[in-house]
Image (cartoon, rainbow, N blue to C red):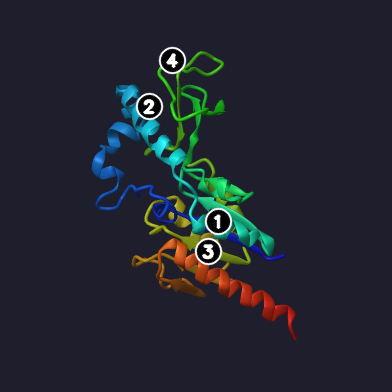
Amino acid sequence: MKKIVIFTGAGISEESGIKTFRASDGLWEEFNIARVATPQGWREDYKLVLGFYNKLRKKVIDASPNLAHIGLAQLEKNYDVTIITQNIDNFHERAGSTKVLHLHGEIMKSRSSLYPDLIYNIKGSKLKNGDKCEMGFQLRPHIVWFGEKVKNIDIANEIVSTADIFIIIGTSLNVYPAAGLIDFVPREIPKYLIDPNDSNICEVANLTIIKEKAIKGVAELSKSLTKDIVSSIVP
């Protein structure tokens, strides 16, 4: 069974009603990055940070995976599929994908503000002031903030190096270290980029660009992959 590795960004969840952070009307236009997405912001006003992620968590809970998420989950019928995502939502899991690696954390989890390996599931939409880990320290969102190490990046690099097919969906590949994943993908394998925006990776070898939003692009790619399967078994 061929191994597909899929790298997803904010664009795939935009069609579920979750704003991207960097768009002109995105979340960073509404909130100051330094106040809600940095360790310093947490130290200065952790209640503000809790409130920001509580609102975002509620939006994720109220929204649903879209047809792009569902389409990727259905690829598991014919392929060994691993999804690496920059997104903090849980739409891939809710759509049925069984192997998902989150690079930037998970909105539905919290962790100790002092012991980062103490991680907990959040029940409901709110992480409150006074919610503490077993060691007695305030819980914070399980999110990788600006200035913090992306702990899963080495695992992600190893996963993409073993891909037979590599797919990128809904990301500009402008944010490092995640943007460097493309450097670990085998040069000779087929690669696909699904994104309506211009990209800076057009010169990558064996790259097919599908300049569509995620739902339409995943549907188009799925048809192409299905044809490849059929042609490989029909003489």
Q: Is residue 148 above or below residue 156?
A: above
Cα distance in 3D space between marks 2 and 3: 34 Å
- Cβ–Cβ under 8 Å for marks 4 and 1: no
Which kind of residue does numbered mark 1 sit on?
Ile
* Residue 126 rendering spot, x and y as whole percentages: 43, 26
Circle 2 residue:
50
- The quadrant of the image that shows the C terminus is bottom right
Name the mark on residue 130: 4
Q: Which mark is nearer the camera, 2 or 1? A: 1
Which kind of residue does numbered mark 4 sit on?
Gly
Cα distance in 3D space between marks 4 and 1: 37 Å
Residue 162 shows in the view: no
Q: Which is more N-terminal, label 1 or label 4?
A: 1
Q: Which is more N-terminal, label 4 or label 3?
A: 4
**Picture quadrant of residue 197:** bottom left
Q: Which is more N-terminal, label 1 or label 3?
A: 1
Cα distance in 3D space between marks 3 and 1: 15 Å
Q: Is residue 103 above or below residue 164?
A: above
* Residue 136 rendering spot, x and y as whole percentages: 51, 13
Name the mark on residue 167: 3
* Residue drawn at the location 68% of the way across and 61% of the way down: 77
Q: Which is more N-terminal, label 2 or label 4?
A: 2
- The quadrant of the image that shows the N terminus is bottom right
Relative side of 80 to 109, left or right: right
Mark 1 residue crowding within 10 angstroms, few (<14) / some (14–19) / many (20+): some
Cα distance in 3D space between marks 2 and 1: 30 Å
Q: Which is more N-terminal, label 3 or label 2?
A: 2
* Residue drawn at the location 50% of the way across and 59% of the way down: 68
**Picture quadrant of residue 53:** top left
